[in-house]
Amino acid sequence: MIVLMTDFGVSDPYVGQVHMRLRTIAPEVPVIDLFHALPSFAVQAAAYLLPAYCRHVPAGAVIMAIVDPGVGTSRQALAFTAGGRRFIGPDNGLFEMIARRDTVASCVALPVPADASPTFHGRDVFAPAAAAWARGTRPTGRDVALTRYPQWPDDGCFIAYIDHYGNAVTGLRAAPEHRAIRIRGHLLKRARTFGERPAGEAFFYENANGLIEIAANGASAADRLGLELADPFVLEA
């Protein structure tokens, strides 16, 4: 299968255009729209979400991940393997946490066709490579190494994504010792699930993908607490 994770949104034509290119080249390959609401332009935030939401993707799948504000510049277009999965996307830090947590192998820089749109490599560069790879034709190109971002912390103690419920997903992997956090002046305690807290009360929990997530029982935590993307938080004893 081909799994798509982008910041393209679903109300614009971009996802549909990518699907058309994939369907044209590999009509028999299932395409999964896993995530098209990665935070727009926010490469670092998406980098913390990527490994969490990829962990249920089966081995052998092609993951086409795109948050690419530098599209058309000198940044490289990559294809590589890691953790038994195949990745395609821009070399801009999006895969930094993938590289830290798994061994990257067979990394190549994809050639950019002369007729490719300089502002839509998702359709014209990444999609053709993903479709061909899913059919068994490995991408070819120069052997390269991912550009690394060692200054980024191993976990992101900030809000990386807010879903339509108003739940705020963070870039921090949950651990048993995480018992309380403070954000925007609010002290939040941990719960195992929504029903453990009174209606409307805000709390945090380990979400289904292993990340700390802030929620409110039956309400929008973002509205109740005034949360926004990139808001930082601190762990409390």
Image (tube, rainbow, N blue to C red):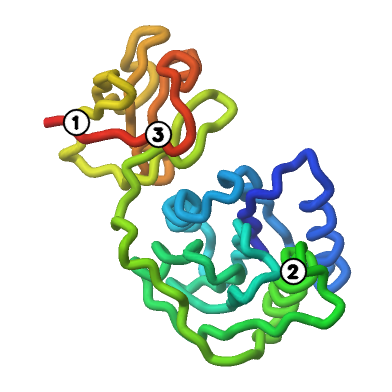
At x 16%, y 30%, the residue is: 236
Quick check: 205 above or below 73?
A: above
Residue 237 image position (x, y, % from top left): 11, 31
Give the residue type that dot 3 points to: Asp
Give the residue type that dot 2 points to: Ala
Give neighbour class at mark 3: few <14, some 14-19, many 20+ (Cα, 10 Å). some
Instruction: Residue 188: name its quadrant.
Output: top left
Give the residue type that dot 1 points to: Arg
Instruction: Residue 137: name its quadrant.
Output: bottom right
Q: Is residue 233 left or right of residue 75?
A: left
User: Which of the two discs, 2 and 1, labels the residue nearer the N terminus?
Assistant: 2
Q: Nearer the viewer, residue 202 or 191?
A: 202
Quick check: 41 above or below 80?
A: above
The residue labelled by disc 2 is: 127
Measure the alpha-carbon separation of dots 2 and 1: 42 Å
The residue labelled by disc 3 is: 231
Measure the alpha-carbon separation of dots 1 and 3: 19 Å
The answer to whether residue 56 is visible is no
Q: Nearer the viewer, residue 165 or 181?
A: 181
The residue labelled by disc 1 is: 179
